[in-house]
Amino acid sequence: MADKCVICQIIEGEVPAKKIYEDDDIVAILDFNGANPGHSFVIPKQHIPILEQAPSHLVGKMFNIANKISSAIFDTLKVQGTNIFVANGVPAGQKVAHLMIHVIPRKENDGVNLQWAPKQLSEEEMSTVELKIKEEIGNVGFGESPKTAVSTQPKKAESIKKDVSGEESYLAKQLRRIP
Amino acid sequence: MPEQQMSEEQVKELQEKIKNMSPEELKEFQKKQCIFCHIIEGKVQSKKIYEDDKCLAILDINPSNPGHILLLPKEHYSIMPQVPEDEIAHLFMITKTLSNAALRGLGVQGTNIIVQNGVAAGQKAQHFMVHIIPRKEEDGLNFDIPQKKIPEEELEAIRKKMASQLGEVKEQAPKPNVQELIKPKENVVEADFEESQKFPISEGLETKSQSKKTEEKPGEPEEKDEPKKKEKPQPEKQKPAKQKPPKETSEEVSLDNIADILGVK
């Protein structure tokens, strides 16, 4: 790759980072420019741009690590809350094409805004949305069971790649939908 | 979610009552008070889009965007640190599926996954849930996260603390004081903090390895029809030989797709 993903560079140690956790599949680092001190990222070692491309067992593992970091933040940083946040896609605020889970320590009035103003949808709109999503759930499927690999114990890297082949097909499908 | 209006006296009375409860009674009481437990039990109507024995996904009736999904564990947990590991794995596997379904079904270009632990983090209801929010350009939402330069010494101190804590928490996550975290307060509605910034996607994306995968397998039918059938690990376990080196795959699989999915040309 000519231009390497900056996150991959961090994982390979080419760019310095403050690592707080590492196993075979996952690295967690502190953000140098965090929303608040302790703002962490949970990152898969494999270059996976968006959540949908990550195998389910890796997703489960990543969020478990995120939860442990969240607990560690509560324990060590005297905060009043934490957010777990994922930005999937540019309109969602994704800035780097490498999947990451933000774990953000929160205090009252800390300037972080993950609030929204509710939108009013008509009953009809709600039903349309409901149907569309339900239909796609059937098409998307559920990947492998997380039960096969929920442990956060370090694991062999080759097990990462399980259901990506399944992913390819629907992502390819997605590809064609986009004008 | 509707807020209950109570007089000061009623509040005091209630507080006294809660103070004298046993942990079991308290949990039962919380469930009774929890609108989402009522939804899960079917006492309150909702637009259900997915359900299994562990969780329920519904459409938010006050959505941030059309298709805003709330994924709820059926068990009443107030915050995520209380949720057992296997349930987290399950919930986020479902989250991924729902996010994917929203991406495809609603023609949106992104999703946000948000968990709020504690009122300070924006939590409004006392039932742990995962928000899945479909996103489009110019949809009026702004979840850009502000950046503060954190001094090196502070960062290093935090790193040490967290790393040692995480070493310890590998087995069992310690629980923060839940009662403190979720004690009711007025909802804090904050103003948008800054203008949304458009970022060019990182350099990695511009790599030209556009070998598009167009062949299409119909999604495995047994998974599509039986989401509950979870004890099925064999297919993956049996084929470790098929795997390619991660880097090669990331180029082939990811970059061509993500460029389009993320709306980057």
Image: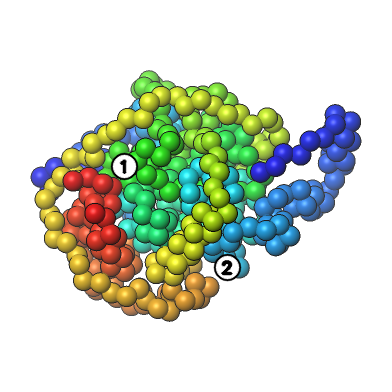
- Circle 2 residue: B52
Is A117 left or right of B235, judged from the image as shown? right
Amino acid type at circle 2 is Asp
Name the residue tied to disc 1: A90
Location of the N terminus of chain B by quadrant is top right
Residue drawn at 10 percent across, 45 percent down: A2
Specify whether B207 is left or right of B184.
left
Q: What residue type is labelled 1?
A: Val
**Would you call the spot at circle 1 few (<14 residues within 10 Å), some (14-19), or many (20 or more)?**
many
- Residue B261 visible to the viewer: yes
The answer to whether mark 2 and mark 1 are in CB contact below 8 A is: no
Name the chain under label 1: A
Quadrant of res A179: bottom left
Of the residues tagged 2 and 1, which is closer to the observer? 1
Residue B128, percent from left and from top = 61, 48
**Snapshot colouring:** rainbow
The answer as to whether the residues below labels 2 and 1 share one chain is no
Quadrant of the image occupied by residue A37: top left
Residue B228 x %, y %:
53, 73
Could you tell me which residue is drawn at 76 percent across and 39 percent down?
B4
Q: Which chain carries label 2?
A: B
Q: Which residue is drawn at 32% across and 58% down?
A: A53
Q: Is residue B4 left or right of residue B249?
A: right
Image label count: 2
Q: Which residue is drawn at 57% across and 54% down?
A: A123
Q: In terms of depth relative to the viewer, which is nearer, B198 or A81?
A: B198
In the rendered image, the vertical position of residue A53 relative to residue B206, given as above or below: below
User: Does dot 2 land on a helix, a strand or a loop?
Assistant: loop
What is the x, y in percent for residue B130?
53, 50
- Residue B5 in percent (x, y) is at 79, 36
Kindly tell me whether residue A29 is visible in this rendering: no
Seen from the viewer's position, the closer of residues B247 and B192 is B192
